[in-house]
Amino acid sequence: MQILTVLIIGIGLFVLQFVENFFLSLLNFRVSFLFFLFGYRKVDKRWLLVVTVVSSIIFDVTMHYRLGTNLVLFLLPSLVLWLFSILFSEESLIGLHVSNFVASLLFCIANILLPDFLEKGVFGFLDWKMVIVCIVKALVATLLLFLIEVLFGRFRDRGNASQIRLK
């Protein structure tokens, strides 16, 4: 069972790399962060940590960043999610969506500032136009996460598909 899980994760990482580069080239939008936010509350933290570390190393190599840049980019929003989980209950939908928005906004801004800081020691350029673009990207990411949650909830609400009901 563990070998099958590792095999699925390995294949999933290759697919994630392809989808990430496609959306990054097409829309300048990081899809892997959406998967990270979705999995933050749904997946066991140990498996999420393994997948995040391996995928961040892969992204660092393919994006020509210093090793650990993407891991720090994922770490900062996860700290925000952890702080919001302390402040709001798990059932609070407003706290969930506000934390997803703030984490997405922080990720987008850190994605502009942090790689140059780690490479050259100088923060990247950020103006109001870029901040507005980051706010729009964070709103889109929050909306997409909401839609994924609704879609995922419909699959889970169907009950046990292996049971046969007789009427």
Image (cartoon, grey):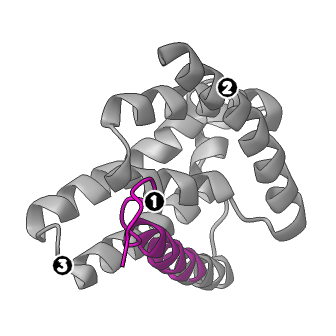
Residue under pointer 2: 10
Are dots 2 and 1 in contact, CB under 8 Å?
no
Are dots 2 and 3 in contact, CB under 8 Å?
no
Classify residue 107 as left or right of residue 128. left
Q: Amino acid at mark 1?
A: Ala
Q: Nearer the viewer, mark 2 or mark 1?
A: 1
The residue located at (38%, 68%) in the rendering is 165
x then y, percent, for residue 34:
56, 60
The residue located at (89%, 66%) in the rendering is 26
Could you say whether the residue bearing mark 3 is in a helix, strand or loop? loop
Q: Amino acid at mark 3?
A: Ser
The residue located at (19%, 58%) in the rendering is 83
x then y, percent, for residue 139:
53, 83
Q: Amino acid at mark 2?
A: Gly
Q: Nearer the viewer, mark 2 or mark 3?
A: 2
Which secondary structure dominates the residues rendered in magenta? helix
Give the residues in magenta. 140-167
Q: How far is the residue under mark 2 from the one under mark 1?
A: 27 Å
Classify residue 22 as left or right of residue 15. right
Could you say whether the residue bearing mark 1 is in a helix, strand or loop? loop
Q: Give the number of the disc on residue 161.
A: 1
